[in-house]
Image: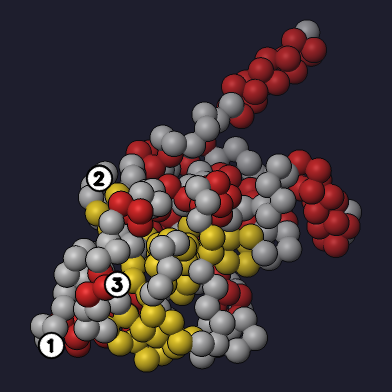
Amino acid sequence: MGKNELLKKMKKNKKNNDQNKWGMAFYNFSLVKAKGIKPFKPVNDDYTVVTVPFPVGVNRMPDEKEGDTSYVVLVYVHYKLGVDGKENAICMAKTYGKKCPVCDYVKTHELDEETQKDLKPKERALYFLKEKGSDDVKFFQVSAPLFEHELGDAREAFAKSGECDPSPIYTEDGCYFTFTDTGVKGLQRFKNFIFKTKEKDLIKKVDKKITDQVFPLDEVLNLHAYDEIKKNMYFDMDELDDSETDENEEPLEAYVEHLPKEKKKKDKDKKKKKKNKDKD
Ligand SMILES: [Zn+2]
């Protein structure tokens, strides 16, 4: 069977088997939707927003403890995975210091420059944002270098002014910041990050109505086991049958405790037993 035929067959199987029509993804938007939170989608305009902090959940933010307050989830993501190149997964190496099958693949294969660039983990930032004049908390997922890094620089510059607390944590001393989305045709670009002096009337609204809307934002991250990512990344046709990599059975340790219990190993054992029986 040629590679193209094989790819077609895989695509078909995948469609039939996949419960999630989007395939592998680094975060689960349906969890956000289920909480009644809408996405924040800036389009070529000026915005005045504040980040709404959330309590950190369990085991998904390595630098934070459960129950700490944070305002952003930062992760590294591999894009262009899957049969269609439209799937993505957290880089377990750069985000959690674990083994990552995509990084391993890049390390062990001679790839052209473009592929190397495509497979390089990209830093993403996830936020809860509230726009000025609205009580609705929204969900924002964006490139960290284009947004969080710019925001950090602006915050540092503004902190010196002492007019209000530019810390990202939404408190009575906190302040809004403005930015301009200058992106065109789906390409996001942000500039003009400026922190605003506290506006008393706005800050009065810092209350339960806002903070009650949030939940541990890190819980939307999808943690896939090494073999799961490997199986779904579809780079190396020759390695497709190589699904039994026992040395990587438990690469995530603490990070996988929220994943559904894997039943594949038991099933495998059963099959093996059955095969042996049939032989007898
Ligand atoms: Zn990686």
Residue 247 visible from this viewpoint: no
Rendered location of residue 82, percent (x, y): 67, 58
Asked if disc 3 and disc 1 are in contact, CB closer than 8 Å, the reply is no
Residue 168's place in the image compared with 154, above or below, is above
Q: Earlier in the sequence, mark 3 or mark 2?
A: 2
* Residue 161: assigned label: 1
Residue 46 visible from this viewpoint: yes
Amino acid identity at mark 3: Leu
Q: Which residue shows up at 63% across the image and 56% down it?
A: 233
User: How far apart are labels 3 and 1 at the CA level?
Assistant: 20 Å
Q: Which residue shows up at 22% across the image and 75% down it?
A: 200
Q: Which residue shows up at 10% across the image and 83% down it?
A: 162
Give the residue number, with chain letter if any, for mark 3.
202
Task: Specify few, some or many for label 2: CA neighbours under 10 Å numbering under 14, 14-19, or 20 or more.
Answer: few
* Residue 67: assigned label: 2
Rendered location of residue 130, percent (x, y): 40, 67
